[in-house]
Image (tube, grey):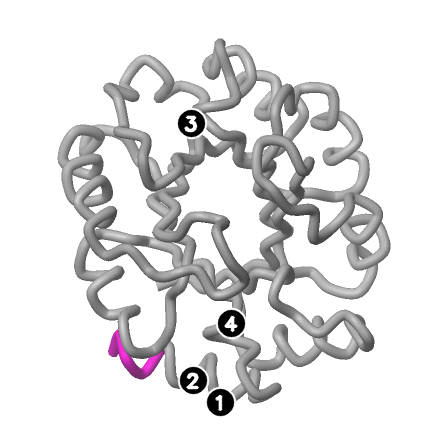
């Protein structure tokens, strides 16, 4: 299991120290939710944060664009040092074109799905698709409930795309208490926010997540 720390749940007062703590705890990616206040009813982080943090760590930067018309931002993300970018299927009329643009800029391209959205046949996207991001919460309240029923998308999706080396990522409400079922469903990478940052115990929480899977 690869572990991606969602900075939307991180304490922002001393973020440079937090990044160092995450790296020493063995986190694999830093996850940035970039929201526009329209596609989702919140705006937690801005893109400036990506450029400011890039010199501080070698960890890959995993950027999740929760916004309409994401294409205009992609060249800037590449310049800031983003390693991988996911855009929402619901926000892209032509996802193959957008994924191709991401890869042409030197980043890995992902396609994200809200809990209510079925995953269609993705085989036509395979040449440009590196990962699929499945959300297991909705942006309802700060502590939105985890929706285990959504994991069926991962199970069926892995079967449908078994001929392609597509990575499956699950994001939303994941903690040590439920991470095992997420990985058993087929998740290759888990995005965790509160599950990592709860009570400021980053190292202990990361260890608990990995132990729950082991």
Task: List the residue tagged with mark 1.
Answer: 204
Q: Position of residue 184 (x, y in %)?
A: 18, 61
The residue segment tinted magenta is 210-214
Q: Residues within 10 Å of mark 1 (few under 14, many from 20)?
A: few
Residue hosting label 2: 207
Whether residue 211 is in magenta: the answer is yes
Q: Image quadrant of residue 78?
A: top right
Which of the two labelled residues, at mark 3 and mark 4, occupies the earlier sequence position? 3
Specify whether residue 138 is painted magenta.
Answer: no
Q: Are marks 2 and 1 in contact (CB under 8 Å)?
A: yes
Where is residue 170 shown, x and y percent of the image? 37, 52
145 over 157 or under it: above or below: below
Q: Which residue is mark 4?
A: 194
Residue at the image point whose x is 64% and y is 24% from the top = 70
Quarter where residue 10 is shown: bottom right
Q: Secondary structure at mark 2?
A: helix
Query: Label 1 vs label 4: CA separation?
Result: 13 Å
* Position in image of residue 20 (x %, y %): 71, 76
What whole-number distance in Å separates the C-alpha atoms at marks 3 and 4? 28 Å
- Report the magenta stretch's main SS: helix
Label 3: which secondary element: loop
Which labelled disc corresponds to residue 129?
Answer: 3
Q: Earlier in the sequence, mark 2 or mark 4?
A: 4
Crowding at mark 3 (Cα within 10 Å: few <14, some 14-19, many 20+): many
Asked if labels 4 and 2 touch by Cβ distance under 8 angstroms, the answer is no
Image coordinates of residue 151 in percent, x first then y, are 22, 49
Which quarter of the figure is the C terminus placed in? bottom left
């Amino acid at each position: 299991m690869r572990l991606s720390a969602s900075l939307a749940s991180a304490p922002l007062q001393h973020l440079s120290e937090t990044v160092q703590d995450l790296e020493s705890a063995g986190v694999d990616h830093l996850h940035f939710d970039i929201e526009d206040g329209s596609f989702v009813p919140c705006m937690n982080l801005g893109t400036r944060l990506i450029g400011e943090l890039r010199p501080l760590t070698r960890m890959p930067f995993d950027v999740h664009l929760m916004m309409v018309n994401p294409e205009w931002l992609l060249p800037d993300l590449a310049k800031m040092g983003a390693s991988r970018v996911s855009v929402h299927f619901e926000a892209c009329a032509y996802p193959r074109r957008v994924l191709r643009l991401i890869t042409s800029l030197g980043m890995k391209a992902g396609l994200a799905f809200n809990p209510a959205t079925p995953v269609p046949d993705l085989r036509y996207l395979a040449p440009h698709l590196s990962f699929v991001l499945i959300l297991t919460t909705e942006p309802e309240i700060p502590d939105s409930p985890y929706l285990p029923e959504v994991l069926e998308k991962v199970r069926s999706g892995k079967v449908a795309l078994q001929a392609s080396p597509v990575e499956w990522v699950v994001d939303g409400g994941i903690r040590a208490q439920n991470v095992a079922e997420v990985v058993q469903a087929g998740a290759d990478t888990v995005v965790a926010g509160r599950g990592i940052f709860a009570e400021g115990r980053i190292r202990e929480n990361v260890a608990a997540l990995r132990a729950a899977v082991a």
